[in-house]
Amino acid sequence: MKSVDALWNRNCEEKFFMKLLEITTAEKLFYNADKHLVAYWPKSYEGVTSTLQSRNSYIGDFTEKWVTELISSVLPKSLYAVSDVECADLGLTSKSAADVVVSKSNSKKQNSDDILIIFEVKMSIVWNWELQNSKLQCLGDYKTHRGNPSLLRSDSMLKAIGKSINIRTSSEAAKRIPIVIIGNTPITKIYYEKIDHLKTSGIIQNIWSLNPYPLDEVTDKDNLKETKDKGFLRFDSLNELKHCVKDLLSCDLNFFSSMKTK
């Protein structure tokens, strides 16, 4: 498996659409822009727009399964990558389960002692696509359309941060478990310092982008590699991902926080 091909790229998105078109209609996956079926409203489109919600659950299920398989491929054989995990000790319920965990157990309902890493997945369709005669054509990267995918959305970032705080403060059992947010785009500049602060304060361990080339121009300055204190990291190969997962598994971490009078 080639390293870049193993990470998120256009082929993953094409596979997503073609797989879903076998079980649902194009209208639930694409916008109709002047009789052109597109994944996002192009920036050049001047007509009335709407928001497509029906695609969200599909892409959520697809990306969580994709991340589970990818993380599983870099783990030692004694450990498991498990999706949709419940754990009462960590505040992870059926309505707010962990997207993916690395664990000693392969069960959907887990004991906190077995969980080694928690991943919150915030991935989406990055490029714009047009469906023509049952075939897909890529129209360009996220700068060519009106949508804000993945970690470029403030609501996605805030939801991921909020869930991480909820897990981190759930009980003593959470203090040793690193929490990582996974996306497939860079983050906006307004979050650079915030994410680094969340890392240094121990709320999250990192934000990881698993998309080496989210922008068609490879040298585009907005394709962030890492923030100053490495709160955000972009992986360009499977080996980089494997190295970071190995580091997290080998670290003996402990979260602590307080506010006291002087």
Image: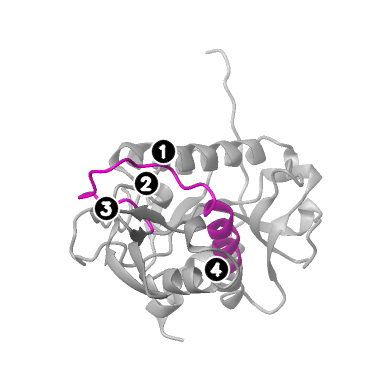
Real-space Cα distance between discs 4 and 3? 22 Å
Q: Residues within 10 Å of mark 1 (few under 14, many from 20)?
A: some
Question: Mark 4 Cα within 10 Å, few/some/many (few <14, many 20+)?
Answer: some
**Which mark identifies residue 154?**
1
Determine which residue is flagged by label 3.
42
Q: What amino acid is labelled 2 in the image?
A: Leu
Q: Quadrant of residue 245?
A: bottom right
**What residue sits 32% from the left and 49% below the top?**
227
Query: Relative to 37, does residue 79 appear above or below in the rendering?
Result: below
Above or below 233: residue 46: above
Q: Write the start and end of the magenta stretch as one range.
A: 39-66
Residue position marked by numbered label 4 in the rendering? 20
Above or below 89: residue 57: below
**Mark seen at residue 165:** none
Name the residue at 32% across, 43% down: 188
Closer to the observer: label 2 or label 3?
A: 3
Query: What residue type is disc 4 on?
Result: Leu
Residue 152 badge: 2
The label nearer to you, 3 versus 1, is 3
Check contact, mark 2 vs mark 1: CB within 8 A. no
